[in-house]
């Protein structure tokens, strides 16, 4: 089937066309209907599942828009109130019904007649949700939904002044690419000092999140939140031991490459020692890469780049633009970070990011663009639940797009020399991100295995893990006070706990797809689109297989992939 970017909103047959989510009283009758409806045949069951899917899509999209609007403007109290209303007044009331519907599905005699090749992963997930559901956790989960958003509110207010101009921390980061070392050092300290100002509230927020999450785990009969979360995330195909093996592989086979990259950087810059404010810099006389001017230019060039890869990819971006589904530029009062938010009913997702005309913004745009393509490809699947794909494949969609798109970055760089530098930057980033992934993941295992820890113990453990995976090529002398709170810049710890190892697993998949792409671009893109269009209807190893990949976290496999990236870097 040829994919089509002229995405259609799912037509409604169960809810009125003009229905919008306002309060629980107007929503509940639909849940009552589904709970009480008799299911007397396989056809009845399939229609009932379609109606559940439609209702889920409408509710999910409403929640997404509340979050999108709030992150686009963290200063408007009405937007925060609308989001909080959903979390506190609607979400908690949905959960008991979701549990009733799950049990109704699992106990129906007609469920066994459903096509298992399509329904297996969905039914497995439903059973998992039944196993985890506890009435006592509903109010805690509602509190967590609201509490997690405080991270964006605290971080969204962080600004620094450089040359009498106020910048968000994302915007100020461009000064770290300056060829003037004094400027880089000054701005680095300003950014870190600004983070330090809010270190205490960030610690407090994190402690509060840990306590609530631990309680959820205990209520559900788990020893700790890590074990609970692994089950909740549907990690059916790997376990904590695989994560520890991944950490070891990073230490053995990636860290030496990272050391090499930074040693070369030091030589290139002609410095006696490389400091953290030097890692993004270019030698004197070489200007920082500037792939685009503003948000609109970033969009236009991304379309051009995607068009060269596959016209369908470009059409997806055009459709999103037509619907006004982009908010790309950094500004004060906007939450930090970047995301692609799938919209279950209308289909075309929303891309949010904080572009400040830097090289890393180009990477973010093609990364989120890969997620967007995934949303488009999975949208035609018949049930909302089939589009709930595992994060480990979702991040392959985005990270492979970073690597595929490099061949077409002439859309951003007319000068061949700049293009070469941009590719080298991307490949370095592909490797240097691995230790950080291992650090964040290992830290979370410790945090939730030891939920009663003090802030002093947390800091000590963080420093221990940080040093274990830190390159010896960067001199951190005198910077321990900044390094001790380095974890606070990682929003995943606050908002999506345990969601981080996925980036490492997916980066391996992305490198595997890129190896295919170097051999046969057409076949690689076919494999890529084939896997993404399956949504969540297959297991993780099956999705990897559909992409022509191996689902493998062993040190030996990781070593092979690293050697491939190393050769590609040497060729540049």
Image (cartoon, rainbow, N blue to C red):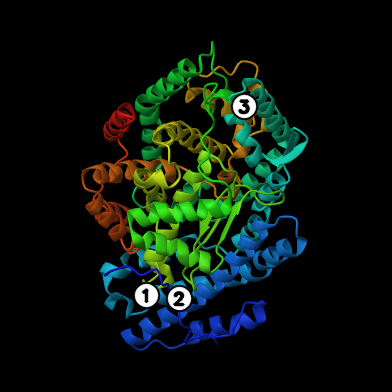
How far is disc 1 from disc 3 in space, using C-alphas? Answer: 48 Å
Dot 1, crowdedness within 10 Å: few (<14), some or many (≥20)?
some
Residue at image x 26%, y 32%?
560
Quarter of the image that includes the C terminus: top left
How far is disc 3 from disc 2 in space, using C-alphas? Answer: 46 Å
Q: Position of residue 307 (x, y in %)?
A: 37, 57
Residue 483: which numbered mark, if any? 3
Q: Which residue is mark 2?
A: 53
Q: Which residue is mark 1?
A: 382
Q: Position of residue 385 (x, y in %)?
A: 42, 68
Q: Please say if 494 is above or below 90.
A: above
Dot 2, crowdedness within 10 Å: few (<14), some or many (≥20)?
some
Q: Please say if 100 is above or below 519.
A: below
First in sequence, mark 2 or 1: give its number.
2
What is the quadrant of residue 245 in the picture? top left
Q: Is residue 114 visible?
A: yes
Q: Is residue 127 visible?
A: no
Helix, strand, or loop for circle 2?
Answer: helix
Q: Kindly report which numbered mark, 2 or 1, lies closer to the viewer in this rendering.
A: 1
Residue at image x 30%, y 32%?
568
Q: Position of residue 57 (x, y in %)?
A: 50, 73
First in sequence, mark 3 or 2: give its number.
2
Residue 299 relative to residue 331: left or right: left
- Does the CB distance between marks 1 and 3 fall below 8 Å? no
First in sequence, mark 1 or 3: give its number.
1
Residue at image x 68%, y 53%?
147
- Does the CB distance between marks 3 and 2 fall below 8 Å? no
- Does the CB distance between marks 2 and 1 fall below 8 Å? yes
Residue 51: which numbered mark, if any? none
């Amino acid at each position: 089937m040829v994919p089509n970017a002229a995405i259609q909103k799912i037509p409604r047959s169960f809810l009125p066309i003009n229905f919008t989510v306002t309060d629980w009283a107007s929503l509940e009758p639909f849940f009552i209907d589904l709970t009480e409806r008799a299911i007397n045949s396989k056809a009845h069951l399939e229609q009932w599942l379609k109606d559940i899917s439609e209702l889920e899509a409408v509710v999910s999209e409403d929640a997404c828009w509340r979050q999108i609007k709030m992150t686009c403007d963290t200063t408007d109290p009405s937007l925060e109130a609308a989001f909080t209303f959903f979390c506190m007044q609607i979400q908690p009331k949905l959960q008991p019904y979701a549990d009733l519907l799950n049990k109704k599905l699992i106990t129906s005699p007609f469920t066994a007649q459903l096509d298992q090749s399509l329904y297996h992963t969905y039914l497995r997930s439903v059973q998992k949700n039944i196993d985890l559901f506890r009435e006592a956790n509903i109010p805690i989960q509602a509190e967590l939904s609201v509490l997690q958003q405080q991270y964006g509110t605290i971080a969204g207010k962080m600004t620094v002044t450089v040359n009498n101009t106020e910048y968000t921390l994302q915007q100020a980061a461009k000064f770290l690419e300056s060829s003037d070392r004094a400027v880089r050092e000054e701005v680095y300290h300003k950014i870190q000092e600004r983070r330090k100002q809010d270190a205490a509230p960030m610690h407090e927020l994190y402690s509060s999140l840990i306590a609530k999450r631990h309680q959820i785990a205990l209520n559900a009969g788990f020893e700790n939140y890590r074990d609970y979360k692994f089950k909740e995330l549907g990690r059916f195909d790997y376990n904590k031991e695989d994560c520890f093996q991944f950490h070891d592989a990073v230490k053995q086979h990636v860290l030496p490459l990272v050391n090499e990259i930074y040693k070369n950087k030091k030589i290139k810059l002609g410095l006696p020692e490389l400091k953290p404010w030097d890692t993004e810099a270019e030698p004197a006389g070489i200007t920082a890469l500037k792939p685009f001017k503003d948000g609109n230019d970033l969009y236009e060039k991304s379309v051009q780049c995607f068009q060269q890869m596959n016209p369908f990819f470009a059409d997806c971006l055009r459709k999103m633009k037509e619907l006004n589904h982009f908010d790309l530029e950094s500004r004060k009062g906007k939450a930090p970070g970047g995301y692609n938010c799938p919209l279950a009913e209308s289909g075309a997702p929303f891309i949010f990011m904080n572009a400040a005309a830097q090289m890393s913004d180009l990477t973010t745009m093609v990364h989120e663009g890969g997620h967007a393509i995934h949303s488009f490809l999975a949208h035609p699947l018949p049930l909302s639940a089939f589009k709930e794909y595992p994060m480990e494949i979702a991040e392959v969609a985005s990270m492979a797009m970073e690597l595929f798109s490099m061949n077409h970055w002439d859309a951003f760089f007319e000068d061949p020399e700049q293009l070469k530098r941009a590719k080298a930057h991307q490949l370095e980033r592909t490797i240097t991100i691995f230790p950080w992934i291992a650090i964040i993941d290992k830290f979370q295992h410790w945090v939730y295995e030891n939920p009663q820890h003090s802030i002093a113990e947390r800091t000590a453990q963080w420093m221990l893990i940080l040093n274990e995976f830190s390159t010896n090529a960067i001199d951190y002398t005198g910077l321990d006070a900044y390094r001790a709170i380095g974890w606070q810049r990682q929003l995943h710890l606050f908002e999506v706990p345990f969601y981080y190892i996925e980036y490492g697993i997916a980066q391996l998949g992305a490198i595997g797809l890129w190896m295919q792409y170097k051999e046969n671009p057409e076949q690689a893109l076919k494999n890529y689109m084939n896997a993404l269009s399956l949504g969540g209807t297959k297991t993780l190893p099956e999705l990897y297989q559909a992409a022509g990949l191996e689902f493998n976290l062993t040190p030996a496999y990781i070593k092979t992939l690293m050697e491939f990236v190393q050769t590609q870097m040497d060729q540049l």
